Amino acid sequence: MAHKRDIDQYLSDLMDSVGPLTPVVTPVLDSNPLSHVAEDIQAALPIPKFDNSAVDGFAVLTTDLQGNGAPWTFPVVGDTPAGAAPQSISLGQAIRVMTGGPVPLSSAALTVIPVELTNAPADHSLPDEITINQHPGGRDNIRIEGEHLHIGDSAVSAQTPLDAGTVATLISVGVSEVSAHPCPRVTVITTGDELATSNKWGIPNSNGPMLMAELQRLGIQNPRCMHTHDDVGALAEVFDQSAKESDLIITVGGISAGAFDVVKALGAQAGGFEFFPVAMQPGKPQGHGRWKGTKVVCLPGNPVAAWVSFRLFIIPVINRLGGAKRVDWMSELPAVQLRTPRALPAREGTVLAIPVEIDWATQTAHSVAHRSHMVGALAGCAGIALVSGESVPEGGLCHVVLGRI
């Protein structure tokens, strides 16, 4: 019988077997958060792009605010909304400037007075003159060109995901395309003659739709799902087809110790696969290998075990294929410490991976499914409580993996 592997050791071994996909030139506007930048990117534009106002207000020369003190009254000689070209200003003048609008052209120091410190009309019409009732207290309210990033500065580091924040940064620094590791193409293969709704004794195939929903939640584009019966030849044909169109194949079922475990049988026949128990419950049977160069990760067939395994193992694999930094330990997965209303008993030598509903208002995790076949308890589950070593008492803190990138 195969030696049972530690859950962290299995994750580390799995990470050893995958690496980032070959980078491709990617338009920033077509990016995917599962895709990661392949190299450091320098700014082609500064941030801010030019000197601009941090407030809605009136720009004046700083020297005009000296003397006997407030109030000061100036003629308004211009109006600069955001996106307009800057205007020139002279001593004794004011120009209205909106937030983000360029400040006036001047070799002398400027100050933008917030509109609330003036007698500006409530209807936002442009006045002929403006009275400044109060000095802004040493703040010039001007964002200086390049004060955040200069041209040539490092704007985005390698292994950064092409998420919303990265897209905003790249567009702001004038970068329209990047070299990035692509989002992996993923195929799910469910197995088993028992997955037949037309048969009175058949079992509904919840695993396929469940994992497709997980892949879509992550942002995988056009994931594929296929099913094969308990026939080694048929499975090999599905593997052949999937390997041509996928960067990752996920199998579900057929890897335990039964007489009809077709995935395990094909893996043993082909070579290059490992199947072994992992010290976790549910999700004890695990396996992985390659089929004609494509990575294959094999999950157990019980629905709760498949769901838990997907979140603990498949998500890090997908992230790594997309160019993210590798994750070697369960402690590196996104997680929180939450209270549990009921005690969670530990089991010697095994990590209990318990699906939980999360109540963020009370910072509590409610355990709902302890056994691998209780698929009905997965509805609403948002995390996995990992219990190892010591039991968690009622009201105690438990470590909850959130199951996201």
Image: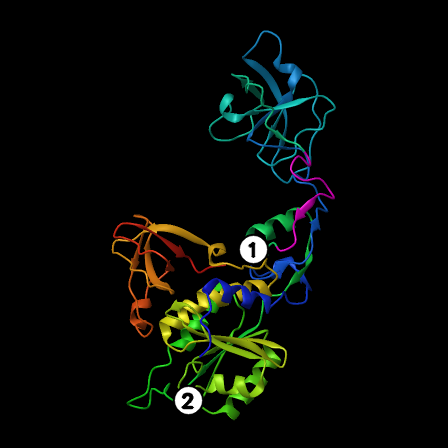
- Mark 2 or mark 1, earlier in chain: 1
Q: Going 54% across and 13% down the picture, which residue do you hit?
A: 71
**SS label for mark 2:** loop
Left or right of 283? Residue 8 is right
Q: Nearer the viewer, residue 69 or 390?
A: 390
Q: Quadrant of residue 237?
A: bottom right
> Which label sits on residue 13?
none
Can residue 156 be found in the magenta stretch? yes
Q: Which mark is residue 260?
A: 2
- Asked whether residue 212 is in view, the answer is yes
Q: Is residue 70 above or below residue 184?
A: above
In screen coordinates, is 394 left or right of 242?
Answer: left
Under circle 1, the secondary element is loop
- The colour scheme is rainbow
Q: Quadrant of residue 289?
A: bottom right
The picture quadrant where one finds residue 154 is top right
**Residue 305 in the image, given as x and y percentages of width and height:** 38, 71
Q: Looking at the picture, how far across and down is residue 173, in whole percent? A: 67, 46
Q: Which labelled disc corresponds to residue 163?
A: 1
Q: Which residues are magenta?
A: 145-159
The residue that appears at 69% across and 24% down in the rendered structure is 89
Q: Amino acid at mark 1?
A: Asp
x%, y% of residue 33?
56, 59
